[in-house]
Image (cartoon, coloured by chain):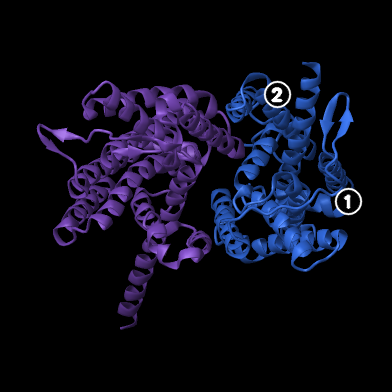
Amino acid sequence: MSPLARDRLLLLTMGAMIFSIPLVMRNPYYLNVLNIVALNVLVVAGLTLLIGYAGQISLGHGGFYAMGAYISALLAIHLGWNPWITTGIAMALTGMIALIIGIPTLRLRGHYLVMATLGFNLIVYILLIQLDDITGGPSGLSRIPYYTIGTWGFTTDLRCYWLVWFFALLGLFLAFNLVHSRMGRALMAIRESEVAASCLGIETWRCKTEVFIVSALMASLAGSLYAHYMSFISPKTFDIFYSIEVVAMVIVGGIGSLWGALLGSAFLTPLPYLLHFFEEYKDLIYGAIFMGVLIFLPQGLAGGLVKLYQKRRLMSQLKKVQE
Amino acid sequence: MNQNLAQFIFSGTTTGAIYALIALGFCIVENSMKIVNFAQGDFLTLGGMFMFSMLYALHLSILPAIVLSVLAVALIGAAMERFALRLAKSKETVVLVFITIGASIFIRGGIKLIWGKSPKSLPYFSGAHPIDLLGARILPQSLWVIGGTIAVFLALHHFFHHTKQGKAMKAVAYDPKAAALMGINVEAMMMLSLALAGGVGAVAGILIIPITTMTFDMGVMLGLKGFAAAVLGGYGDVMGAVIGGLLLGLLESLGAGLISSTYKDVIAFVVLLLVLFLRPRGILGKEEWERV
């Protein structure tokens, strides 16, 4: 079986499992957490393409997430346009901004790239707070219209579950296609050595900018979905901690693997909710777990699982030989 | 107008000196491990908090309180290297940098647990009576901050350029394997650099707690500003850290005074991005050639 076919089969199985969860569990609180996981999967999958495959770091995707949410919400509230259409417009605008920012920014490397993307996120965040005539300032926007199909609205956590997970899995599916294409191989070449890649005739700046835009589009889509699902947004959701958190999901999941995007989001998103139980110790424990995973599972959860599987297979083969 | 300008320049220099001091902390770790240490801002908070406790809980006089606070944070920095960074199974930059972010969250959680959420303050070192200088009024504490930054800068400049230890540390950053073959104790050097970064962070915290008061999450924003300053000047360069810090402080203060105080951070970051687009390695940074 080709790697792409294997990934698609695994994705299909995963999708079947994910879509059967609501059959046994309908607690709106848990469903809400799972919906946030799905939105993060979308953002993290895009970032995995950028960080894991192209080797470019960004601590600014909270900014694109914010643009998706605010542009779509504002158009839907003030002009009364259909949320599906405003979501598309938000993606188009975010993509254009990503292009304008990406060209000069992606020339930077290492710490300089980290700072530039971080700076972009900080600028967006401050503007969201200060332009309060438009954005509602720190208190944000409320009563954002829901998505609808005819008269049927995505108004509950359960209904939105189908919606957000559909887009999360679609995002993963497209990302797998990209990774197994000519473009994906070009990106990996850039990650290993930019000079070598350009010697092979790969237009490195073009590839980097394209994948940057793709990841921004995925973040924008997630942002719009978030806005029309929660029906309320405020700048707090889109600060640099969000950007740090999603990059942490990429790393904790396993840097070079799209499956890591799924695992990382599924692991780190609910963690703060679970640690709520520890009250004042929760930041301490969160920090310790965060460090612990990075220290002891450097290939992330996905890498850890693969290793465990390989070890088991090796052991069983060893047993067979011994017998 | 002229008087105002002088005032903006002085207050900008004071904030700039603080940013420079934090940037110097980033610089030290870069010069041994080639990573960004995002816990640098929290070292500053720790310094201020320890100082507060040494004075009010242990009733020490100022000088021993300063020495003990600096040592305490240096110890925490060393512990961070020994028990987190050194244990890391992957030495990839991204992984190490995110371990420092984890450490930052951990330290902040600890500070909140021990010192609580309420802001802590200390009296000025030498009175609150402002001094008139060129028509501008400056607090004596600002002079302490500027003096402290100059002292730390001179000490670090001497350390990295004129001592064997400092050169050994830079050798570790350049190539750990080659450095080890030359008989340098690589791990000890890395531990020393984090201890130094902790000490410098503590000094910054002690100097600014009378001006700004200290809350548990103060280090986040100040740490980012220090990082921005270090990048602006040219990451890892001691002189660049000071230039970047002063420039960022002046930009903010002049931007706030002459253009708009609500958008001072936006102005500062936009200028930072523009500088990076024109000089991708900061003001003093040199273009590195990649050997293929």
Asked whether, in this view, residue B16 is left or right of residue B128, the answer is: left
Task: Tell me residue A243's x, y (percent).
Answer: 47, 42
Asked whether, in this view, residue A301 is left or right of residue B44, the answer is: left
Q: Mark 1 lies on which chain?
A: B
Occupied quadrant, residue A148: top left
Q: Which residue is drawn at 55% across and 28% down?
A: A107
Q: In the depicted view, which residue is nearer to us: A104 or A188?
A: A104
Q: Residue at x 31, y 37 (%)?
A: A227
Q: Which residue is drawn at 83% across and 39% down?
A: B146
Q: In the depicted view, which residue is nearer to us: A72 or B35?
A: A72
Under mark 1, the amino acid is Thr
Occupied quadrant, residue B82: bottom right
Q: Do we see residue A91 in this rendering?
A: no
Q: Mark 2 lies on which chain?
A: B
Q: Is residue A266 depicted above or below B87 in this figure?
A: above
Residue mark closest to the camera, 2 vs 1: 2
In this figure, which residue is indicated by the disc labeled 1? Answer: B163
Q: In the depicted view, which residue is nearer to us: B221 or B262?
A: B262
Label count reads 2
Q: Which residue is drawn at 38% across and 67% down?
A: A308
For chain A, what colour was chosen? purple
Q: Residues within 10 Å of mark 1 (few under 14, many from 20)?
A: few
Asked whether, in this view, residue B80 is left or right of residue A217, the answer is: right
Task: Tell me residue A87's x, y (percent).
Answer: 28, 29
For chain B, what colour was chosen? blue
In this figure, which residue is indicated by the disc labeled 2? Answer: B254
Q: Are marks 2 and 1 in contact (CB under 8 Å)?
A: no
Q: Is residue B99 depicted above or below A197 in this figure?
A: below
Under mark 2, the amino acid is Leu
Disc 2 is placed on an element classified as helix
Task: Tell me residue A257's x, y (percent).
Answer: 38, 49
